[in-house]
Image (cartoon, rainbow, N blue to C red):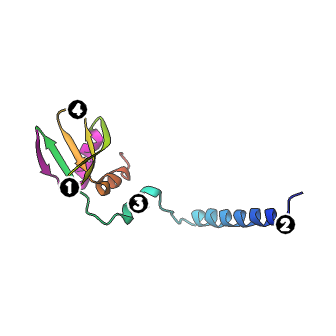
Amino acid sequence: MASERTLFIINVSLGLLSVLLLAMLLGMELPTLGQAQYALDKEEPVCMIEWSGNSTAFDDIDRCCLQAREQLECQAESKDALDWVCGTGAGLRIWLNDKAYNYCKQQPYW
């Protein structure tokens, strides 16, 4: 037979789980880790398009995310406060900072 302490811990855990399930049933949305990480990051999203060694700032973050998603892969790589690079090889490369990358990951097409 389980001890009183074990039963208490089980009851508290089941109570918390039932509160979370009830909140979800009532339509409350809990943030995912990506949304929380995006909200806590206070820098501005930055997107840079690089072609043939020339870089240009790209201000439309939604279009930037679409272009980055069309690339073969995205990998972590640092360059001038930019943390991610998406590309297919030596041609077009799209550079994103963490804020822009986390925003893009939240989009339904990512």
Question: Marks 3 and 1: which is nearer the front?
Answer: 3
Looking at the picture, which amino acid does disc 4 mark?
Gly
Secondary structure found at label 2? helix
Looking at the picture, which amino acid does disc 2 mark?
Glu
Residue 28 in percent (x, y) is at 53, 66
Q: Residue at x 81, y 63 (%)?
A: 7
Question: Which residue has dot 3 on it?
Answer: 37
Vertical relation: 97 (above or below) 29 = above
Looking at the picture, which amino acid does disc 1 mark?
Asp
User: Contact, CB < 8 Å: mark 4 with mark 2?
Assistant: no
User: Contact, CB < 8 Å: mark 1 with mark 2?
Assistant: no
Question: Marks 4 and 1: which is nearer the front?
Answer: 4
104 on left or right of 14: left
Looking at the picture, which amino acid does disc 3 mark?
Gln
Q: Residue at x 72, y 62 (%)?
A: 14
Q: Is residue 68 magenta?
A: yes
Question: Which residue has dot 4 on it?
Answer: 89
Kindly identify which numbered label has been placed on residue 60: 1
Kindly identify which numbered label has been placed on residue 30: none
Residue 26 in percent (x, y) is at 58, 67
27 on left or right of 13: left
Q: Earlier in the sequence, mark 1 or mark 2?
A: 2
Secondary structure found at label 3? helix
Question: Marks 3 and 2: which is nearer the front?
Answer: 2
Q: Is residue 110 magenta?
A: no
- Mark 1 nearby-residue class (10 Å; few <14, some 14–19, many ≥20): few
Q: Which residues are magenta?
A: 53-70
Q: Residue at x 54, y 65 (%)?
A: 27
Quadrant (top left, top right, bottom left, bottom right) of the C terminus: top left
Q: Earlier in the sequence, mark 4 or mark 1?
A: 1
**Nearer the observer, 83 or 24:** 83
